[in-house]
Image (cartoon, coloured by chain):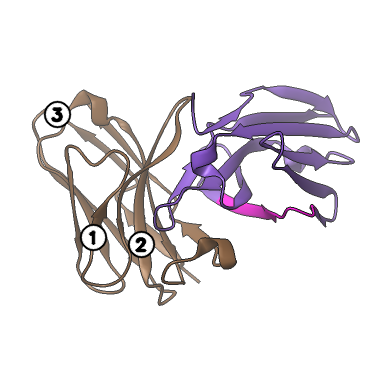
Amino acid sequence: RKEVEQDPGPFNVPEGATVAFNCTYSNSASQSFFWYRQDCRKEPKLLMSVYSSGNEDGRFTAQLNRASQYISLLIRDSKLSDSATYLCVGISGGYNKLIFGAGTRLAVHP
Amino acid sequence: NAGVTQTPKFQVLKTGQSMTLQCAQDMNHNSMYWYRQDPGMGLRLIYYSASEGTTDKGEVPNGYNVSRLNKREFSLRLESAAPSQTSVYFCASSEGVGDISSGNTIYFGEGSWLTVV
């Protein structure tokens, strides 16, 4: 089993829709979690950190469920500019060792 | 406002050739990393350098060598390229010595597309 697993998608949604991605993780990648965004042929960029209590940044909400070992990202009121691949990232016990999921692709259409 | 700069952006190599990917950061970060990204695999850590003068293997180090030339620069060398090394390579850096979870963001370069034929 991969340490961090994501549904590859693509998720095709209309503008204004609410979409949610889940990511599951194994114990080895369980220290801290992040969501990164990666545009086509670009580098990953940090979208938000994921805290146990959940956190919100504008239209984006991240939740961590340690009991079920999954992380979620909710995007409300989707924009065309949200079209990208969203990478779920955990940290292993090693030094700053980020464990990346393969990514979930989101396509928002008019 | 360069951040992390990688060169070259694109390269085609023949099997057995060698090459070096260059990376430099201007954020005075202590830690630097090399990742590769393959379809369906996610980014995987090749090597990292916690601080100037130190380097350590990551998840997939075979076939690669690295040099932390100074605090700014961290190069990745392929001594004898193989088709399995066809990938997108990302250099990255982070500020803190040891703790991304405390909020030290990791910053990526724009990537280097390498094809080995």
Q: Are marks 2 and 1 on the same chain?
A: yes
Q: Chain of mark 2?
A: B
In this rendering, would B106 be left or right of B10?
right
Query: Which chain is displayed in brown in the rendered image?
Result: B
In this rendering, would A103 be left or right of B23?
right
Along the viewing direction, whichever of B12 and B90 lies nearer the viewer: B90
Estimate how packed mark 1 is, as few (under 14), some (14 to 19) or many (20 or more) residues with alpha carbons within 10 Å.
some
Q: Circle 3 — which element?
A: loop
Residue named by callout 2 = B32
Q: Amino acid under label 2? A: Met
Along the viewing direction, whichever of A47 and B17 lies nearer the viewer: A47
The C terminus of chain A: image quadrant = top right
**CB of mark 1 within 8 Å of CB of mark 3?**
no
- Residue bounds of the magenta highlight: A45-54
Estimate how packed mark 3 is, as few (under 14), some (14 to 19) or many (20 or more) residues with alpha carbons within 10 Å.
few
Q: Amino acid under label 3? A: Lys
**CB of mark 3 within 8 Å of CB of mark 2?**
no
Q: Residue furthest front?
A: A67
Mark 2 or 1, closer to the camera: 1
Residue B12: percent from the left, percent from the top?
Answer: 23, 33
Does label 2 or label 1 sit earlier along the sequence?
Answer: 2
Q: Chain of mark 1?
A: B
Residue B55 is tagged as 1
Residue B117 visible in rendering: no
Q: CA distance from mark 1 to mark 3?
A: 28 Å
Does label 1 or label 3 sit earlier along the sequence?
Answer: 3
Q: Main secondary structure of the magenta part?
A: strand
Compared with residue B53, is residue A33 higher up or lower down, i.e. above or below? above
